[in-house]
Image (cartoon, rainbow, N blue to C red):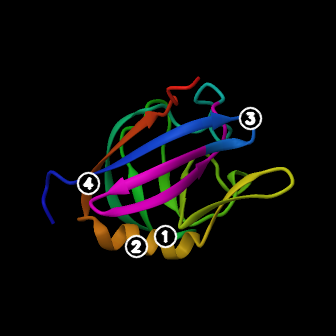
């Protein structure tokens, strides 16, 4: 894998969660996170920025990507989950977006995470951007 390859997450905030598109190489996935709540621990998604990630075997989540040096946060992972309510500030990836009566969601999260982990080296850069459609 080329060391210049990086993960890009472009996301949009809603009161129900933060929905995004993750791309790396030719792979495109969806992401779900908590809503933006001023970077509050366990309550908010993390700030946009550029982070180094490393592959990590989490005792609670299995194979993950661990974001390093997130301002005022620790142990931020990209792991399998379907809903923002299953996250404490982390990011979940999915093959497709979804919605329930009260939450945004991503589906096939474990399959998406496996594809992501297979697509990247042991250490990779992730850039998180806020997406603002031109029509807004």
Please tell me which residue lies in front, 55 or 118: 118
Q: Which residue is mark 1?
A: 112
Can you tell which quarter of the image residue 44 is in? top right
Q: Secondary structure at mark 2?
A: helix
Magenta-colored span: 19-36
Which dot marks residue 15?
3
Callout 4: helix, strand or loop? strand
**Residue that appears at 40% across and 73% down:** 115
Residue 98: quarter of image: bottom right
Q: Percent position (x, y) of residue 17?
A: 68, 43
Q: Residue at x 38, y 67 (%)?
A: 116
Tell whether position 48 is magenta.
Answer: no
| Residue linked to disc 4 | 124
Cα separation, mark 3 vs mark 2, equals 29 Å
Per the model, the C-alpha gap separating discs 1 and 3 is: 24 Å
Q: Image point 51% across, 76% down: which residue?
A: 111
Which is more foreground, mark 4 or mark 3? 3
Question: Are the residues flagged by discs 1 and 2 in contact, CB closer than 8 Å?
Answer: yes
């Amino acid at each position: 894998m080329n060391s210049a390859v990086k993960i890009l997450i472009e996301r949009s905030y809603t009161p129900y969660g933060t929905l995004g598109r993750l791309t790396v190489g030719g792979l495109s996935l969806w992401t779900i996170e908590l809503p933006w709540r001023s970077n509050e621990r366990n309550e908010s998604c993390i700030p946009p920025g550029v982070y180094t990630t490393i592959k990590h075997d989490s005792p609670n989540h299995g194979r993950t990507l661990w974001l390093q040096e997130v301002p005022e946060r620790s142990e931020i992972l990209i792991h399998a989950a379907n809903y923002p309510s299953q996250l404490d500030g982390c990011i979940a990836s999915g093959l497709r977006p979804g919605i329930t009566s009260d939450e945004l969601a991503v589906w096939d999260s474990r399959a998406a995470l496996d594809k992501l982990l297979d697509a990247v080296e042991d250490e990779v850069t992730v850039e998180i951007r806020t997406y603002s459609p031109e029509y807004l």
